[in-house]
Image (cartoon, grey):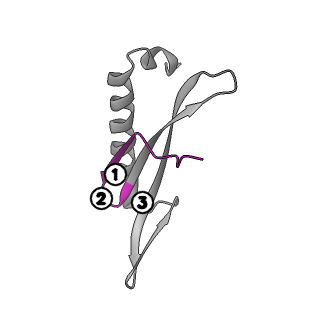
Amino acid sequence: MPENKPIHKISVGGIQVAIWSNEGKEGTTYNSVSFDRRYKQGEEWKSTNSLKANDIPKAILALQKAYEYLALKEPAVEKIYEIH
């Protein structure tokens, strides 16, 4: 089975966002986004999905960049993710 790798990654400070391409049940393709915060504990790098207060602006920026990447890749994404 082939390894699933993100189609794009964005890093802002210790925040990393990954954009994934997925295939739905009926063969449709859709994208999803995951994020984590990387930090060093001693000599070892670790990750968590919890944010400290000063990480929130970095996460917002990274997620905005992910949205921009998807919107430029697929202009129809703006219609899919309309804010009501």
| Residue 67 locus on image (x, y percent) | 39, 32
- CA gap, disc 2 and disc 1: 7 Å
Residue 67's disc is none
Disc 1 target residue: 58
Q: Earlier in the sequence, mark 2 or mark 3?
A: 2
The amino acid on which the numbered mark 3 sits, given as a three-letter code, is Ala
64 in the magenta segment? no
Q: Are marks 2 and 1 in contact (CB under 8 Å)?
A: yes
In depth, the one of 47 and 55 nearer the eye is: 47
**Predominant SS of the magenta segment:** loop
Identify whether 2 is placed above or below 80. below
Tell me the SS state at disc 2: loop
Identify whether 63 is placed above or below 53. above
Point out the frontmost of discs 3 and 1. Answer: 1
User: Residue most toward the right?
Assistant: 25
In depth, the one of 52 and 31 nearer the eye is: 31
The amino acid on which the numbered mark 2 sits, given as a three-letter code, is Gly
Identify whether 82 is placed above or below 36. above
Residue 13's disc is 2
Q: Earlier in the sequence, mark 3 or mark 1?
A: 3
- CA gap, disc 3 and disc 1: 10 Å
| Residue 20 locus on image (x, y percent) | 48, 39
The segment highlighted magenta reads 1-15
Rendered residue at 39%/70% (across/down): 39
Point out the frontmost of discs 2 and 1. Answer: 2
